[in-house]
Image: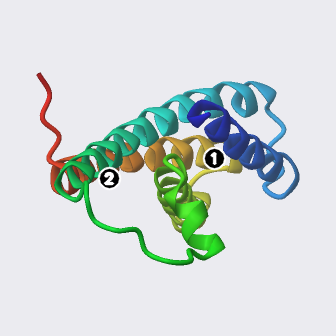
Amino acid sequence: MLLGACGLFQSLFIFIAIYALSIGNYLVIIMIPIGVTLALYYGSLIMFESYAQVERREKLRTQFRSKKGKISIIRKILDFPISKPILILFILFFILFIIIYPVCITFVDNVLSFIITEFICSVIILLIANAFERGYARVQRY
């Protein structure tokens, strides 16, 4: 599910690149988003495992507490295991893309700026996922 969500997100960026940014090089449109999809997948997998480990720890501590009453729809969506990592990474990727692309377009053409922007955003997303894993979950690997 994580890989499919990352692929759908990158297909949105392919659509934006073709029509809004007028990038006509099909090699760039196909090859770069495949690598970025895999980077987003790996980052979301890291964050998913972090959330899962924290939830397992909390469940062990609070096994016998009573459940709360009614839960809102937004809370139900956010309680689904893969929604938090996906939302965090996609929002951060989109914000970084919006910030970095205009800076790159001032120095190089649109195809090269798309490549640079996607690469920089994917590296930053991986660094953020790693920092999240180190800071939030303190994952212990065996």
Q: How many marks?
A: 2
Residue 72 screen position, x and y as percent: 60, 76
Q: Give the vertical position of 69 relative to 125 (above or below).
A: below
The residue tagged with tag 2: helix, strand or loop?
helix
Q: Is residue 74 left or right of residue 123?
A: right
Which residue is located at x 62 percent, y 39 percent? 6
Number of the label disc, if any, that sits on residue 114 = 1
Number of the label disc, if any, that sits on residue 140 = none
Give whichever of 48, 68 is nearer the camera.
68
Q: Amino acid at mark 2?
A: Ile
Q: Give the vertical position of 118 relative to 95 (above or below).
A: above
Point out the image quarter for the C terminus.
Answer: top left
Residue 87 screen position, x and y as percent: 54, 58
Give whichever of 40, 16 is nearer the camera.
40
Answer yes or no: is residue 106 visible.
Answer: no
Dot 1, how many residues are within 10 Å of its Cα: few (below 14), some (14-19), or many (20+)? many
Q: Is residue 19 left or right of residue 120?
A: right
Q: Is residue 21 left or right of residue 134?
A: right
Q: CA distance from mark 1 to mark 2?
A: 21 Å
The residue tagged with tag 1: helix, strand or loop?
helix
Location of residue 10 (image quadrant): top right
In this rendering, the label closer to the viewer, 1 or 2: 2
Which residue is located at x 79 percent, y 32 percent? 25
- 1 and 2 marks in contact (CB < 8 Å): no
Task: Name the residue carrying label 2.
Answer: 128
Q: Amino acid at mark 1?
A: Phe
Give whichever of 66, 128 is nearer the camera.
66
Which residue is located at x 46 percent, y 51 percent? 85
Judged from this view, the residue extending furthest toward the right is 19
